[in-house]
Amino acid sequence: MRPVSVSFPAAAAGKCFAIAIAGTALLLPTILDAEAQSRRPLSTSMTCSQAQSMINQRGAVVMSTGQYTFDRYVSNRNFCERGEFLVRANIPTKDKRRCTVQRCDSASPFEFNR
């Protein structure tokens, strides 16, 4: 019997590279989905009922209402901090200029009313 010599360094490097490429291909959609989910929903890209439904389903949503404006809208008082209370707010949506939703506000006398 003759001994067989096998060279592993080149083969191993090729396998490692292939595994790294496969791993990146598998993780890329997950990374992109997480990044897409981290963006705030834009109220003007949905109807009033869609915005209200999203808030009711999630309980609380940080939603953009314009290019530089956003706020946190809630479905009920349970999503407010201690010392905060519910106030009605109007946001622009695709079908209405004033869609009524709720947000939390504090009763501090040193804060300006929104």
Image (cartoon, rainbow, N blue to C red):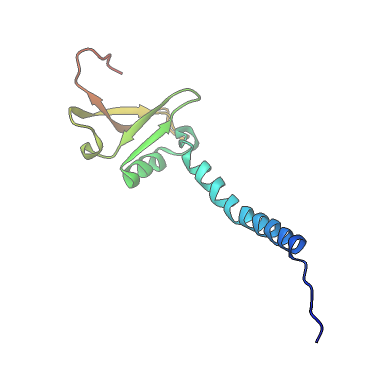
Which residue is nearer to you in this view: 25 or 81?
25
For the point 79% across and 77% down, the residue is 4
User: For the view shown, which residue lies furthest in the right direction?
Assistant: 2
For the point 50% across and 25% down, the residue is 67
Percent across and percent down for residue 107 are: 19, 21
For the point 18% across and 31% down, the residue is 82
Percent across and percent down for residue 83 are: 17, 27
Asked whether residue 61 appears in the rendered view, the answer is yes
Percent across and percent down for residue 100 are: 33, 32
Tell me if 114 is positioned left or right of 97 in this view.
left
Which residue is nearer to you in this view: 97 or 111?
111
Tell me if 85 is positioned left or right of 69 in this view.
left
Residue 4 in the image: above or below residue 105:
below
Residue 70 in the image: above or below residue 21:
above
Percent across and percent down for residue 64 are: 44, 30
Which residue is nearer to you in this view: 21 or 96?
21
Residue 72 in the image: above or below residue 4:
above
Tell me if 31 is positioned left or right of 53 in this view.
right
* Quadrant in the picture for the C terminus: top left
For the point 30% across and 43% down, the residue is 59
Asked whether residue 99 appears in the rendered view, the answer is no
